[in-house]
Image (cartoon, grey):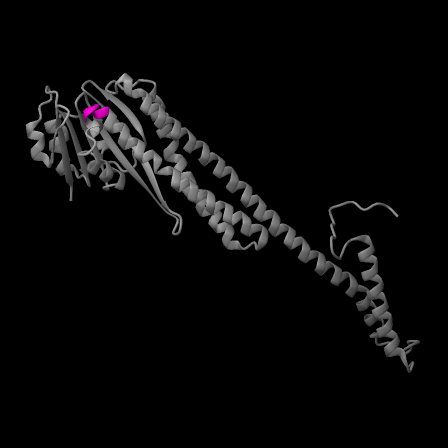
């Protein structure tokens, strides 16, 4: 169900809040400042307001409903149209969701349209009666407050991702398991979603901070530059995290490869020792009638002793070569004796 929240500020202090009935008391030519916040929009509910009452272009009205629209800025003669993005990631379930905010900004009005009632939007709506400066300074200043709140939501999320990556990296070097690689791949997918929406938004905020938007006052550009700086830090952090994840994946594969090499080394040692023992057993197990030691009284113990002696000699030889034992490293060249 579509929800309409309307705030109308006359002068500096006279604030009226309510539903669409408040819009009837506002005139485009007046000095009063208007904010319309629309949540859960449908075409049937918002088309009469956006296209009929305000005369917004049908393509801009269509973009407010499209779920895949990336951050953008479109100038129109009497207003600016913006699309901003925010991303929420459940790191436990690795369920990522992207939120879109469409905004129509004029000289004395701001219309925001979004799918869900974000907590930040609710906070600003509840702050408005006690901090009328948000709207008194102009609809563009209110837009800055909303976008700044959306951008700042990225920082705690990025900190959580950093902690998850650090935990996985520590676990890789203590007890590597296949589930750690799955965790890294899920985290990388979440970060890629963040990056896909953050880069266009950084370009959009850079465009706004340069003064390209016609209805954002020059004295308020410094606030949007601050938001752009935050967005720039976020995208840089995302790139650093992607590199850290790639490094963690390489470390995991290296640790697994080293563990496999250790296992293969042990198996190779056993195979090398068993080879001469099998040779001896094979010689004395042949079905020839005349074998010198075959009818010897101590032949059985002689064969076992010979096998044990060869096994011990080979173990001593492998250890002196540094192929087995504590600190063995097959990749380091050994000095010639």
Q: Position of residue 314 (x, y in %)?
A: 83, 61
Compared to residue 190, the image places residue 21 above or below, namely: above
Q: Judge left or right: residue 219 versus residue 233.
A: left
Q: Residue at x 33, y 21 (%)?
A: 222
**Residue 128 position (above or below residue 31):** below
- Asked whether, in this view, residue 192 is left or right of residue 120, the answer is right
Tell me what residue is drawn at x 86 percent, y 78 percent: 300
Q: Position of residue 254 (x, y in %)?
A: 61, 47
Q: Residue 50 appears at what percent x and percent y?
A: 15, 30
Quadrant (top left, top right, bottom left, bottom right) of the N terminus:
top left
Q: Quadrant of residue 96?
A: top left
Total residue callouts: 0
* Residue in the foreground of this view, choosing between 284 and 21: 21
**Rendered location of residue 19, percent (x, y):** 10, 37
Read off the magenta span: 136-140
Seen at 57% across and 44% down, the residue is 250
The answer to whether residue 59 is seen in the rendering is: no
In the image, is residue 138 part of the stretch drawn in magenta?
yes
Predominant SS along the magenta part: helix
As for residue 153 lying within the magenta part, the answer is no
């Amino acid at each position: 169900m579509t929800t309409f929240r309307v705030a109308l500020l006359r002068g500096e202090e006279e604030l009226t809040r309510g539903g669409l009935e408040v819009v009837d008391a506002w005139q485009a030519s007046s000095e009063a400042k208007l904010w319309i916040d629309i949540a859960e929009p449908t075409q049937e509910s918002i088309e009469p307001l956006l296209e009929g009452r305000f005369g917004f272009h049908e393509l801009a009205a269509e973009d407010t409903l499209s779920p895949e629209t990336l951050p953008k800025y479109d100038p129109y003669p009497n207003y600016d149209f913006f699309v901003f993005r925010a991303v929420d990631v459940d790191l436990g379930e690795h369920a990522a969701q992207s939120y879109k905010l469409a905004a129509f900004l004029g000289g004395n009005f701001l219309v925001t349209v979004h799918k869900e009632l974000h907590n930040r939007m609710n906070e600003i709506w509840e702050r408005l009666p006690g901090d009328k400066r948000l709207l008194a300074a102009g609809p563009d200043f209110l837009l800055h407050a909303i976008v700044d709140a959306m951008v700042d939501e990225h920082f705690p999320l990025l900190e959580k991702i950093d902690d998850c990556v650090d935990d996985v990296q520590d676990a890789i070097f203590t007890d590597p398991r296949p589930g750690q690689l799955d965790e890294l791949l899920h985290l990388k997918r979440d970060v890629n979603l963040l990056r896909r929406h953050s880069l266009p938004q950084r370009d959009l905020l850079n465009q706004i901070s340069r003064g390209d938007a016609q209805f954002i006052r020059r004295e308020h550009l410094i606030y949007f530059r601050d938001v752009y700086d935050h967005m720039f830090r976020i995208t840089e952090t995302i790139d650093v995290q992607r590199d850290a994840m790639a490094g963690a994946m390489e470390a995991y594969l290296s640790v697994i490869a080293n563990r496999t090499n250790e296992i293969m080394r042990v198996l190779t040692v056993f195979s090398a020792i068993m080879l001469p023992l099998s040779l001896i057993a094979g010689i004395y197990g042949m079905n020839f009638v005349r074998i010198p030691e075959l009818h010897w009284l101590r032949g059985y113990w002689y064969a076992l002793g010979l096998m044990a002696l060869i096994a011990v000699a080979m173990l001593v030889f492998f250890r002196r070569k540094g192929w087995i034992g504590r600190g063995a490293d097959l990749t380091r060249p050994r000095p010639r004796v």
